[in-house]
Amino acid sequence: MSAVTKLKMTVSEYLAKEQQAEFKSEFYNGEVFAMAGGSREYNRVKENLVGELFARLKGGDCQTYSSDQRVLVEATGLYTYPDIVIVCGSGTYDPLDRDTLTNPVAIIEALSPSTERYDRGAKFRNYQQIKSLTEYLLVAQDEPVCERYVRQSDGSWALVSFVGLTAVLALTSVPVQIPLVDVYSGIIFSDITLR
């Protein structure tokens, strides 16, 4: 018995397929990975953050993109759709696809049970290869916790956690502070409802 060889896709084939696809997919090392939808809480937290960031950055040099903005990690070849991307100044795009961003300054991922390990591990290791990236945020959906990783001058990443509804999430890549009570507006934690 012989093993079946899995055919790998080229970047050009992936980009052509992605233009016609009904659902987004990540691409890495010749393979395509379908992306799953999120829970109500996941979507609420992500949309709250998009709204808060948009309002605070409006009219400035930096702007946000939500989960439909594809990002290429040029050093590793990963094409992915972060939950939220912040870009300052002019965007730089993949020469093969003018809609694929290559220079985010911040990436935010809302955590879900199915993606948390990947977001904390392999995906973060890929993101660390983006030279322009200075900040990576992980936002829990089941408790009021945001973790902010900031690139240090020696290339290491320093972690600061913002915990509880009275905490204020402070970003370093852009001059923005967002109370966690606003990030988690509309989410129910045990007996507490945030409005």
Image (cartoon, rainbow, N blue to C red):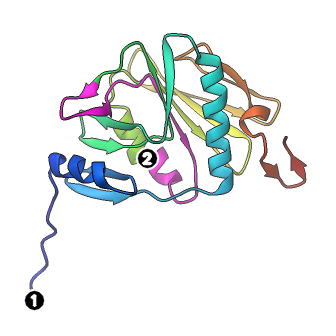
In this view, the residue farthest toward the right is 191
Quarter of image, res 55: top right
Q: Residues within 10 Å of mark 2 (few under 14, many from 20)?
A: few
Nearer to me, 114 or 26:
26
Q: Position of residue 125 (x, y in %)?
A: 37, 39
Q: Secondary structure at mark 1?
A: loop
Q: Secondary structure at mark 2?
A: loop
**112 magenta-colored:** yes
The span picked out in magenta is 93-120
**8 magenta-colored:** no
Q: Position of residue 70 (x, y in %)?
A: 37, 39
Instruction: Please name the residue that numbered disc 2 is placed on.
Output: 121
Instruction: Please name the residue that numbered disc 1 is placed on.
Output: 1
State which tag comes first along the sequence, 2 or 1.
Answer: 1
- Give the amino acid at mark 1: Met
- Give the amino acid at mark 2: Gly
Whether pointer 2 and pointer 1 mark residues with C-beta atoms closer than 8 Å, the reply is: no
Q: Is residue 58 above or below residue 54?
A: above
